[in-house]
């Protein structure tokens, strides 16, 4: 267990002045589940600060200016971590996770800001600028690593008044050595999206769904490590499978590839279940699957029905035996694939 890892997880569904969302709180709970999982983040439950709409919702309160959570509740969650760190000579733990989901905007091309429940079109000052907060913890060096994920829009509100962290700057000599990984649902001036993504009927942010899928299924490198670089590649490959091209969101990741962080260690490569349908097979032509090294990895007689098999991540070709041309497929570790051949 990563006993010295910590997290602040924020999910805001209810916005009286901006319109409610359905996914952020589900996303926050989903991320917390991964944080606590033995095969996930392994973060102790007592080290996770949750700030979500349902904890503060009061149906009798009709004044949108009094809607919660506000910056006060989020800042208080960070305050608790800072107090612990100051009581421990300025060091608190190995990694800090910051997860922010809800309505959002960008005041510049670099940052993204999560709007609070009491925000409105003329009240954009009620927000948490994710990168600015994450950078505060980097320069303070309370942690060895800082991970930031933001599933919110990045509409261009360049005139919005910035909300800065309410703590004095702490510039530790160790700040330059703090590793970081920042992931945003979309790029500057674009919008994030949410929808039902599984059979449960629950709505999730597409970025968070892809992120959690990647955290669980990204194949490790030759050392058995799931790095930020590999996680990024998985998300970019997985997101286009969730939506049509016109609805696609283009996420953004910022990290130092030369000082990458490890999200998980896996000694076994995650294989994918591949289902191949043959509606019009030629009974005289056996079929085969060839890998990227032109090695035949599986064969079977041509017949109707579905061919199911497990394949490691990589590029393959399905073809009739003896032929050079076939149908190409790409397998991503842990992701089910259904192809139709012929």
Image (tube, rainbow, N blue to C red):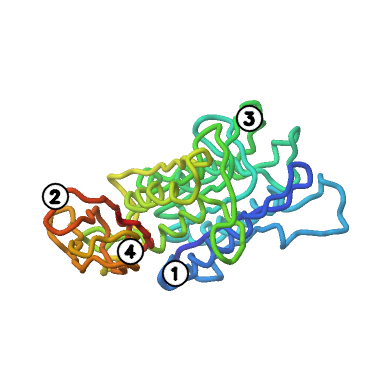
Give the residue pinned by disc 4.
274
Question: How far is the residue under mark 4 from the one under mark 2?
Answer: 21 Å
Question: How far is the residue under mark 2 from the one under mark 1?
Answer: 47 Å
In primary-sequence order, the first of circles 3 and 2 is 3
Other residues around mark 2 within 10 Å, as few (<14) / some (14–19) / many (≥20): few
In primary-sequence order, the first of circles 3 and 1 is 1
Residue visible at 32% across and 61% down? 278
- Say whether residue 93 is left or right of residue 304: right
Residue visible at 49% across and 42% down? 248
**Discs 3/1, front:** 3
**Discs 4/1, front:** 4
Which residue in the rendered view is the most extreme toward the top?
A: 159
Give the residue pinned by disc 1.
42
Observer-nearest of 46 and 274: 274
Q: Circle 1 sits in a helix, a strand or a loop, which is it?
A: loop
Residue visible at 59% across and 50% down? 194
Question: How far is the residue under mark 3 from the one under mark 2?
Answer: 55 Å
| Residue 196 position in % (x across, y down) | 59, 56
In primary-sequence order, the first of circles 2 and 1 is 1
Q: Are marks 3 and 4 in contact (CB under 8 Å)?
A: no
Residue visible at 32% across and 55% down? 227
Q: In the figure, residue 79 lies in which quadrant?
A: bottom right
In primary-sequence order, the first of circles 4 and 1 is 1
| Image quadrant where one finds the C terminus | bottom left
Give the residue pinned by disc 2.
324
Other residues around mark 1 within 10 Å, as few (<14) / some (14–19) / many (≥20): some
| Residue 138 position in % (x across, y down) | 45, 46
Give the residue pinned by disc 3.
157
**Discs 4/2, front:** 2
């Amino acid at each position: 267990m990563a006993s010295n890892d910590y997290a602040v997880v924020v999910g805001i569904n209810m916005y009286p002045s901006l319109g409610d969302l359905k996914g952020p709180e589900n996303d926050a709970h989903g991320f917390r589940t991964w944080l606590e999982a033995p095969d996930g983040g392994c973060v102790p439950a007592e080290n996770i600060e949750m700030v979500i709409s349902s904890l503060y919702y009061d149906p009798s309160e009709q004044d949108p200016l009094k809607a919660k959570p506000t910056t006060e509740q989020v800042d208080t969650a960070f305050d608790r971590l800072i107090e612990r760190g100051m009581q421990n000579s300025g060091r608190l733990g190995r990694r800090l996770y910051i997860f922010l989901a809800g309505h959002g905007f960008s005041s510049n091309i670099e940052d993204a800001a999560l709007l609070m429940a009491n925000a409105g079109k003329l009240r954009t000052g009620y927000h948490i600028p994710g990168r600015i907060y994450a950078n505060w913890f980097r320069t303070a060096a309370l942690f060895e690593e800082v991970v930031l994920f933001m599933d919110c829009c990045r509409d261009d509100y360049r005139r919005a008044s910035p909300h800065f962290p309410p703590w004095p700057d702490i510039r530790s000599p160790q700040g330059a050595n703090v590793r970081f990984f920042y992931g945003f649902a979309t790029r500057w001036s674009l919008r994030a999206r949410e929808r039902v993504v599984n059979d449960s009927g629950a709505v999730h942010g597409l970025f968070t769904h892809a992120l959690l899928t990647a955290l669980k299924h990204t194949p490790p490198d030759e050392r058995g490590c799931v790095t930020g670089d590999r996680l990024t590649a998985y998300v970019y490959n997985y997101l286009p499978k969730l939506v049509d091209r016109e609805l696609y969101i283009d996420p953004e990741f910022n990290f130092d590839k030369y000082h990458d962080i490890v999200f998980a260690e896996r000694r076994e490569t995650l294989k994918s279940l591949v289902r191949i349908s043959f509606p019009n097979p030629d009974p005289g032509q056996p079929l085969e699957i060839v890998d990227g090294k032109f090695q035949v990895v599986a064969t079977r007689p041509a017949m109707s029905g579905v061919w199911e098999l497990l394949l490691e991540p990589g590029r393959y070709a399905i073809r009739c035996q003896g032929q050079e041309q076939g149908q190409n497929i790409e397998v991503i570790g842990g992701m089910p694939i259904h192809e139709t051949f012929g």
